[in-house]
Image (cartoon, helix red, strand yellow):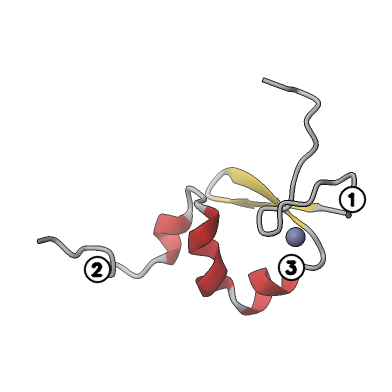
Amino acid sequence: MNDTAWQTCIHCGRSEAEIPLTSWRLAGEFFWICPDCLPFLIHRRNEVMPGWHLAGRRVLQKKGEENAEG
Ligand SMILES: [Zn+2]
């Protein structure tokens, strides 16, 4: 574990050493995002958020969409 690791943008992976990051939280989990990627969160949230693998993704998916048994 590295306590001093810089946070990185959840979308593009750049660190706070390269670009300003803001923290957000979802379902008790923090994530960080840079200004360049913030528009994705605002305008294309339903497209990009599943790829971020946040705990809260379950909340964002409509019930039944991933319930494809068989
Ligand atoms: Zn970014």
Q: Earlier in the sequence, mark 1 or mark 3?
A: 1
Ligand 1 sits in which quadrant? bottom right
Find the distance from the CA under tag 1 to the CA under tag 3. 16 Å
Tell me what residue is drawn at x 18 percent, y 65 percent.
Answer: 68
Determine the secondary structure under disc 1: loop
Query: Identity of the amino acid at label 2?
Result: Gly
Q: Residues within 10 Å of mark 2 (few under 14, many from 20)?
A: few
User: How many numbered tags mark residues here?
Assistant: 3
Find the distance from the CA under tag 2 to the CA under tag 1. 40 Å
Tell me what residue is drawn at x 79 percent, y 59 percent.
Answer: 34
Q: Earlier in the sequence, mark 2 or mark 1?
A: 1
Report which residue position mark 2 lands on.
64
- Is 68 on the left or on the right of 41, as rendered? left
Residue 58 lies, in percent from the top left, at 40, 57
Q: Looking at the rendered structure, which numbered label has been put on residue 38?
A: 3
Q: Are the residues flagged by discs 1 and 3 in contact, CB closer than 8 Å? A: no
Quarter that holds the N terminus: top right
Q: Residues within 10 Å of mark 1 (few under 14, many from 20)?
A: few
The part of the image, by quadrant, that contains residue 39 is bottom right
Tell me what residue is drawn at x 57 percent, y 72 percent.
Answer: 45
Determine whether the beta carbon of the residue marked 2 sits less than 8 angstroms from the nearest atom of ligand 1: no
Tell me what residue is drawn at x 24 percent, y 68 percent.
Answer: 64
Query: Identity of the amino acid at label 1?
Result: Glu
Determine whether the beta carbon of the residue marked 3 sits less than 8 angstroms from the nearest atom of ligand 1: yes
Q: Residues within 10 Å of mark 3 (few under 14, many from 20)?
A: some
Q: Looking at the rendered structure, which numbered label has been put on residue 35?
A: none
The residue most toward the top is: 1
Find the distance from the CA under tag 3 to the CA under tag 2. 28 Å
Query: Identity of the amino acid at label 3?
Result: Leu
Q: Are the residues flagged by discs 3 and 2 in contact, CB closer than 8 Å? A: no
Q: Looking at the rendered structure, which numbered label has been put on residue 18?
A: 1
